[in-house]
Image (cartoon, rainbow, N blue to C red):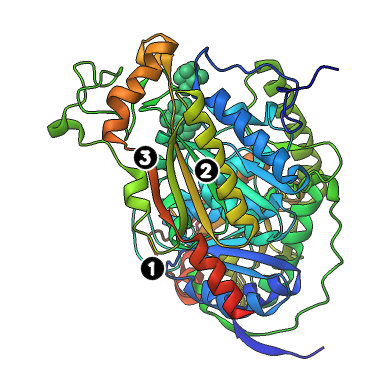
């Protein structure tokens, strides 16, 4: 008898992704859905998709979802979690959504130590609106609003969300991952699972930053986009665990018992 | 039932909690801080009650949208500049048909303006305020007792129509101390099917405002329009005061209506017969009810603490059937009843 080694996660609807070929959003969606299945939390999960390429995420995730206005996901997610503390609540955000228009909501949700998870897709551009500069755009990177490349004097520097947010006491677990190779995808999935588990255990705020290809706006092939993440993007945004206070939180919870 | 002496901002808070409000988010701004502080002190002591001091008014409105989706009765409050910041969120709540209460304790504007009572936000409140083709139900209390009653009503209307409801008052109302009786709130009627609480073993749901297909979006707009049409017919509220042998009628709401009542009392016995038409719902504006009066009374004076905003609605309601004059004090200036009485007397005698 044939053994199933690969199938559609239960938490993904039968719809076909609208994402461009080679886009990191599809991969991120799939591994989030796998994690939801593995943790058996489909029925208690509420997701908050952003304005951005992932705005239609509710067409894909088979969990309850509410679309947030651009940047406001963490405010909504915080409120949902506080209203329904035993649900698993995650906000899914692009770099424009999280690090520009929604930096205040994201920063303060993290600082309050909201027991939610943010999945942060860093693709160095505004995907949905056609490839403008994002806060995370690399220096010298060409976008439609930095036609000569991002200029540090005129446009400022790439915002390093993981480095900054890991300074906040409210953050329990924060890791930066990549989805540009099977090995990295597996690592990302592990990180997402750990983040959701951290929330389920009541240990507080978690954020997973995912370096994610946008071949369309990078004007590269899918393969070259994956290479660019390795060779260029990850030099500015090094992957790794920036904060992991889960063990400490577990110990504190046990001591309190 | 016991009378209690309370200032307006506290009255709103207490009435909200009694009405079952279990989620409040807000950002400090004068002259409504007492309401935020009241919620901070009291909502957490009821079971399931959540208070969140948000990082901005933008965050606050999105917080109440989230909690509303999760199924709670929700409220946020602010004053004029903060209400401007909430507009995208209010539009989004209207689009997603999320009930919720927004309290605006108006202050002088435009811009930072000042912290004195004003009525400069009428257009913003009644014309939607944010982007898109939507309406917000707007209640304008005229006394401490009405602050209590209408706050409870606001929650019922928000649930009934699955729409944001605004309580539009001003700094004067917020600070005013009056004896209040808190009535018994009605039990909540709101279906679980509109709540987003996790799919359980069933089908997942989603709530969204984005409708990329113009035909879907048009249909959604028409659906909302049909709802607004029902509200326009069913929900107008107003008060008539001293109307019987009135030869001129003042149209005023909220604090301005109280000042008008004071002026009317002063003018009694002076041979000047004036009445008051006080809209209690600003949207829907009690248009037909005001028009009916025009069969009898032909002179109107609109009085607002603004340069004339409700004036437009009065004109639309009276449709040229009557003469309309206007008196206003914008920017946080509050006339005394005596001052208004003088203005009324002059206009009354001028035989316009
Ligand atoms: C208030 C507001 N401003 C602007 C927009 C337009 N807008 C939609 S998505 C987006 C940026 C998306 O970029 P990002 O967050 O990086 O996500 P991506 O599309 O790259 O996944 C913008 C500017 C909007 N929807 N709302
Ligand atoms: S534009 Fe970029 S981020 Fe958006 S779907 Fe295409 S590849 Fe993905």
Q: Can residue B129 be seen in this view?
A: no
- Please give the residue where the numbered disc 1 appears in the rendered image: B115
Q: Does the residue labelled 2 lie within 8 Å of ligand 1?
A: no
Q: How far apart are marks 2 and 1 (CA)?
A: 49 Å
Have a look at marks 1 and 3 and say if they share a chain: no
Among the 4 quarters of the image, the one containing residue A254:
bottom right
Q: Residue at coordinates 46% horizontally, 63% vertically from top-left?
A: B27
Circle 2 Cα neighbour tier, 10 Å, few/some/many (<14 / 14–19 / ≥20): many
Q: Do labels 2 and 1 share a chain?
A: no
Residue with the most extreme left position? A153
Disc 1 secondary structure class: loop
- 10 Å neighbourhood of mark 3: few (<14), some, or many (≥20)? some
- Classify mark 2: helix, strand or loop: helix
| Residue denoted by label 3 | A100
Q: Where residue B293 sits: x, y (%)?
A: 74, 52
Question: In percent of the image, x 65 and y 67: which residue is there?
Answer: B273
- Nearer to us in this view, B322 or A205: A205
Q: Earlier in the sequence, mark 3 or mark 2?
A: 3
Task: Report the side of B55 relative to B165 (left or right).
Answer: left
Label 3 near ligand 1 (CB < 8 Å):
yes
Residue A233 is labelled as none
Location of residue A133 by image quarter: top left
């Amino acid at each position: 008898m044939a053994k199933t080694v690969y199938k559609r996660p239960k938490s993904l609807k039968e719809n076909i992704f609208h994402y461009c070929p080679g886009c990191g959003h599809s991969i991120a969606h799939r591994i989030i859905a796998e994690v939801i299945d593995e943790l058996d939390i489909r029925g208690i999960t509420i997701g908050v998709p952003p304005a951005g390429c992932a705005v239609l995420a509710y067409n894909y995730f088979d969990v309850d979802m509410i679309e947030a206005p651009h940047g406001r996901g963490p405010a909504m997610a915080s409120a949902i979690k506080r209203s329904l503390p035993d649900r698993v609540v995650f906000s899914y955000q692009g770099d424009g959504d999280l690090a520009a228009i929604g930096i205040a909501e994201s920063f303060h949700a993290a600082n309050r130590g909201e027991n939610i998870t943010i999945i942060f897709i860093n693709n160095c551009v505004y995907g949905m609106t056609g490839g403008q500069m994002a806060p995370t755009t690399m220096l010298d990177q060409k976008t439609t609003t930095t036609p000569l490349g991002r200029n540090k004097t005129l446009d400022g520097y790439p915002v390093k969300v993981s480095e900054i947010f890991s300074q906040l006491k409210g953050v329990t677990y924060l890791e930066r991952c990549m989805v540009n190779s099977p090995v990295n995808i597996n690592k990302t999935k592990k990180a997402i699972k750990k983040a959701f588990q951290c929330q389920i255990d009541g240990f507080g705020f978690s954020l997973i930053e995912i370096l994610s290809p946008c071949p369309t706006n990078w004007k590269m092939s899918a393969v070259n986009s994956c290479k660019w993440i390795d060779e260029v993007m990850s030099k500015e945004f090094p992957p790794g665990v920036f904060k992991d206070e889960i063990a400490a939180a577990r110990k504190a919870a046990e001591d309190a018992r | 039932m016991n009378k209690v002496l309370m200032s307006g901002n506290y009255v709103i808070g207490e009435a909200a909690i009694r009405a079952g409000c279990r989620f409040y988010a807000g950002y400090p701004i004068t002259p409504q801080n007492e309401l935020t502080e009241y919620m901070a002190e009291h909502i957490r002591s009821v079971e399931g009650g959540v208070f969140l001091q948000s990082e901005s008014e933008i965050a606050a409105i999105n917080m109440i949208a989230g909690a509303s989706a999760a199924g709670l009765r929700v409220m946020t409050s602010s004053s004029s500049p903060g209400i401007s910041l909430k507009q995208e969120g209010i539009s989004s709540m209207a689009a997603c048909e999320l009930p919720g209460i927004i309290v605006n304790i108006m202050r002088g504007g435009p811009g930072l303006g000042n912290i004195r009572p004003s009525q400069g936000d009428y257009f913003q409140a009644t014309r939607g305020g944010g982007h898109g083709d939507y309406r917000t139900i707007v209640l304008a209390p005229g006394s401490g007792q009405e602050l209590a009653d209408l706050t409870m009503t606001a929650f019922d209307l928000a649930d009934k129509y699955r729409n944001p409801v605004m309580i539009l008052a001003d700094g004067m109302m917020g600070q005013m101390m009056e004896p209040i009786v808190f009535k018994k709130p009605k039990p909540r009627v709101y279906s679980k099917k509109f709540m987003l609480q996790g799919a359980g073993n069933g089908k997942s749901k989603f709530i969204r405002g984005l409708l990329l297909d113009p035909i879907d979006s048009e249909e959604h707009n028409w659906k909302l329009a049909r709802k607004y049409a029902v509200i326009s017919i069913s929900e107008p509220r107003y008060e008539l005061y001293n109307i019987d042998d009135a030869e001129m009628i003042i149209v005023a709401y909220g604090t301005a209506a109280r000042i008008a009542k004071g002026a009317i009392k002063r003018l009694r016995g002076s041979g000047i017969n004036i009445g008051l038409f006080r809209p209690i719902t600003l949207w829907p504006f009690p248009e037909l009810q005001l028009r009916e009066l025009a069969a009898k009374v032909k002179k109107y004076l609109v009085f607002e603490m603004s340069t004339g905003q409700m004036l437009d609605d009065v004109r639309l309601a009276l449709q040229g059937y009557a003469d309309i004059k206007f008196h206003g004090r914008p920017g946080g200036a509050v006339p005394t009843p005596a001052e208004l009485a003088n203005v009324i007397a002059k206009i009354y005698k001028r035989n316009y």
